Amino acid sequence: MYCSGRLLRYILCVISVICAVGGCLLIWYGAWLLESLEDQQRVGVLDHGEQLAAVLCILLGCVIILTSIFGCVALGRDSRTMLICHAVLLVVLLVVQFVFFSISFAASRDTLPDTLRQGFDDLWDPQHAGNSSLNTYEQWLHCCGRNSAEDYIHLDKELPVSCCLDLDCTKPLNLFMTGCELQFKDYLSAKTANFHSLSWFLMLTEFAGSVTTCYLVDSIRNHRDRVRFYN
């Protein structure tokens, strides 16, 4: 039982280090997300909650690192109470990350920002003319219309310069053919792919850490009971 307890300590120590590395990666992802928002702000596009998501990722990464350090301290002190708290914290983090993952996954599949929806409404409105919020997305995402550039043709509307590379529609090859709805969903999917992979990695690691901690607490209890029995 003593060897088993020592092995569990080694495993938990490795898991804590892995969790800390995952927390650092999550902080890096949040910082990268914040930096990428500068391009959107330059073209006048709202961040659609990405700034909040980036801050939450950074905070969650910090909490994961602190939890890993707490687990190492509990391991060094061989404290059952601290180890139990560590296991509870890992389970709470697992639940929180699963909620974040679910929200992010749903948003990357179905959600469109209100400004983009308004742009689509303006496109289909025969009375609307002039600039629209859709033009901003066309310039930013290099797309045209909702489904394709043919939307403007079917609606007998003039093709905006935002549908062309460098706002130059004199060259046919400069025309963006992809629709903005598909392009925006692809943009979100590409941006959240790393977060989803990292979330699964951390959730599996935290689950393994909580289970290992519970086994270690039981091992410590059994060892102490056996020592008291023989003494």
Image (tube, rainbow, N blue to C red):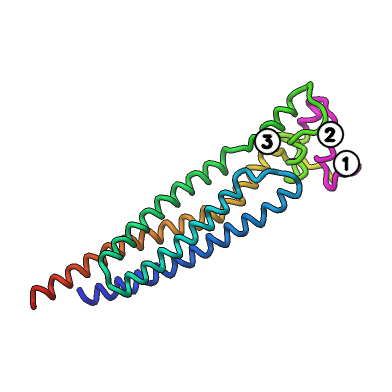
- Spatial CA span between label 2 and label 3: 20 Å
Amino acid under label 2? Leu
Q: Answer yes or no: do the residues labelled 2 and 3 have beta carbons within 8 Å?
A: no
Which is nearer the eye, 52 or 130?
A: 52
Residue 143, position in %: x, y?
Answer: 75, 41
Q: Which mark is residue 222?
A: none
Looking at the rendered structure, the secondary structure element under dot 1 is loop
Taking the spot 44% from the left edge, 67% from the top edge, the residue there is 18
Circle 3 sits on which residue? Answer: 115
The range drawn in magenta is: 150-172
The residue closer to the viewer here, 95 or 161, is 95
Quarter of the image where one finds residue 67? bottom left
Choose the circle earlier in sequence order: 2 or 3: 3
Rendering quarter of residue 173? top right
Q: Earlier in the sequence, mark 1 or mark 3?
A: 3
Q: Which residue is mark 2?
A: 159
Image location (x, y in percent) of residue 86: 34, 62
Quarter of the image containing the N terminus?
A: bottom left
- Gap in angstroms between the C-alphas marked 1 and 2: 9 Å
Which residue shows up at 85% across the image and 48% down it?
166
Left or right: residue 70 compared with residue 173:
left
